[in-house]
Image (tube, grey):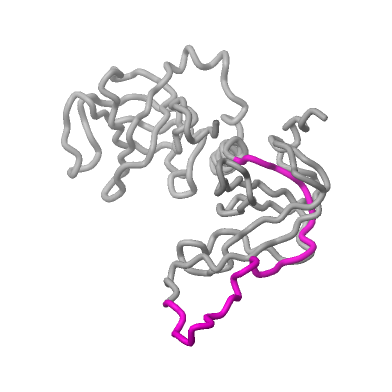
Amino acid sequence: MAASRRRQSPAAQATFVFEGTVQKRPGATMASVPVDETTAVVRVDQVLRAPEALAGLAGHAITVKLTERKRVQPGQQAIFMTTGWLVGDGVAVRSLGHTDLARAVAGRSPESTRDPVAAKAARDLEQHLGDADLVVTGRVTEVRLPAGSARRSTSGNAAPPISEHAPAWREAVIQVHDVRKGAAPGKQIVVRFPASTDVRWAAVPKLQTGQEGLFLLHAVDVSGGRTVHYEARHRDDFRPLDPHGLPAKAARLRKPAR
């Protein structure tokens, strides 16, 4: 079952993770946030994982909306696992949970010494690898229109209008070098990807002949549960190879049993 379908832990769901010191509860740093027992002012002491927009909050006080079952006291230090909420005359985040810092020190994650944006990107990639049905390294040998896509009307009627959000599917034939997750149906696989540059599809990789790298693919079942083809439909579904090898998580994935 894909990771996105499972109940994830707060640490896995969090997009902004930081060490902080509670300064006030109840309290808020923004006038637009109603103050009650679930709001607290917390100073960000160290950012552990963050999107780029929040990576520079160390030393700043922010508003944390606590979960109904979690409480904090002024002076308490903790690791907060949060998601974004409001940005305006301050920053407010929603807590998914927190761990008392004294308890967490012994088992501190190595990501605490890493760049927070890089740490978030690494976590996102790890989760995306879990969602993929097939992960391979390989080379694109051909890009073509899907069979039947160029069919013309024989009735003489005008073709139906094409939606501005239509994906404009293309097929890439990939010569498989190595299987990192799942079981490839052969040494060559066909992968559909959207060639459209519409905002809905713009970030999805536009595969080209000669590209070589790591492909994170999603099985499409359209006939009684039988996998007919694979799709690349997310911005991280293709990652070029670099001189230092594959992303660490991908390198650790076991090959399927023969």
Q: Position of residue 145 (x, y in %)?
A: 65, 69
Vertical comparison of 77 with 223: above or below: above
Q: In which quarter of the view is residue 83 placed?
A: top left
Would residue 115 appear left or right of 55 to someone viewing this image?
A: right
Nearest the camera: 178 or 51? Answer: 178
Q: How far across and how far down the image is residue 23, in percent? A: 29, 26
Which residue is situated farthest in the bottom direction here?
156
Q: Nearer the viewer, residue 139 or 244?
A: 139
Quarter of the image for residue 184 reads top right
Quadrant in the picture for the C terminus: top right
- Looking at the image, which residue is at 25% across and 26% down? 24
Which percent across, then down, holds residue 167? 51, 65
Start-end of magenta stretch:
132-160
- Please give the name of the residue rendered at 49% of the width and 36% of the height, measured from the top-left corner: 4
Above or below: residue 66 compared with residue 250: above
Position of 149 with respect to 165 (left or right) is right
Closest to the observer, 32 or 234: 234
Q: Is residue 134 magenta?
A: yes
Toward the front, the furthest residue is 155
The answer to if 67 sits in the magenta stretch is: no
Residue at left offset 53%, top offset 33%: 3
Residue 249, by quadrant, is top right
For the N terminus, give its image quadrant.
top right
Q: Can you say whether 161 is above or below 36 in the image?
A: below
Question: In x, y percent, where is residue 102?
Answer: 47, 13
Magenta segment main secondary structure? loop
| Image label count | 0
Q: Is residue 117 left or right of residue 34?
A: right
The residue under the point 44% across, 49% down is: 53
